[in-house]
């Protein structure tokens, strides 16, 4: 399914699923590369619904229309916590450190 602009996605989807990925210091210096890898990961996992990305500082937010898409994406990370609130159907927190970054790039065929 198509990647959407963050604002359009938020307007068009009521209570989507959010994965909040905090970039570790060494990864945050490569913010654009890290975001590109995360975007490629979403594509490689074959999303069924719409999704969108937003970056604030060293955090990348990935919103999904479908719960299954959010779940598949989150499985790649060692997620810290999942909550629910009035704005999001689910909200999952993860960290992207060097080890996770290497694991993802290997999964995408970019690894050593």
Image: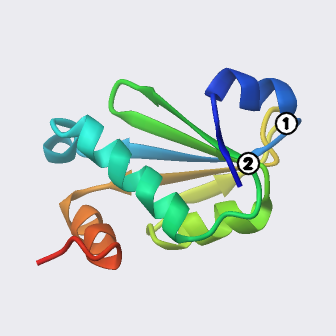
Disc 2: which residue: 50
Q: Crowding at label 1, few (<14), some or many (≥20) Cα neighbours within 10 Å?
A: some
Percent of width and height locating residue 44: 50, 69
Image side of residue 91 versus residue 86, left or right = left
- Kindly identify which numbered label has been placed on residue 21: none
Instruction: Please report the residue visible at 27 percent of the width from the left and 68 percent of the height from the top.
Output: 105
1 up-or-down from 5: above or below: below
Residue at the spot 74% in from the left edge and 32% down from the top edge: 9
* Residue 102 coordinates in the image, percent (x, y): 22, 68
- Number of the front mark, 1 or 2: 2
Q: Secondary structure at mark 2?
A: loop
* Quarter that holds the N terminus: bottom right
Q: Dividing the picture into quarters, in which one does residue 82 lie?
A: bottom right
Image coords of residue 89 (percent x, y)? 82, 48
Q: Which mark is residue 13?
A: 1
> In the displayed structure, would residue 105 be above or below residue 11?
below
């Amino acid at each position: 399914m198509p990647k959407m602009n963050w604002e359009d996605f938020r307007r068009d989807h009521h209570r989507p699923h959010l994965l909040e990925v905090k970039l570790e210091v060494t990864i945050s210096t490569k913010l654009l590369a890290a975001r590109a890898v995360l975007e490629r990961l979403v594509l490689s996992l074959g999303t069924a619904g719409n999704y969108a990305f937003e970056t604030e500082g060293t955090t990348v937010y990935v919103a999904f229309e479908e719960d299954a898409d959010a779940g598949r994406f989150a499985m790649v990370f060692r997620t810290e916590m999942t909550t629910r609130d009035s704005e999001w159907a689910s909200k999952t927190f993860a960290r992207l450190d060097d080890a996770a970054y290497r694991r993802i790039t290997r999964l995408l065929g970019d690894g050593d």
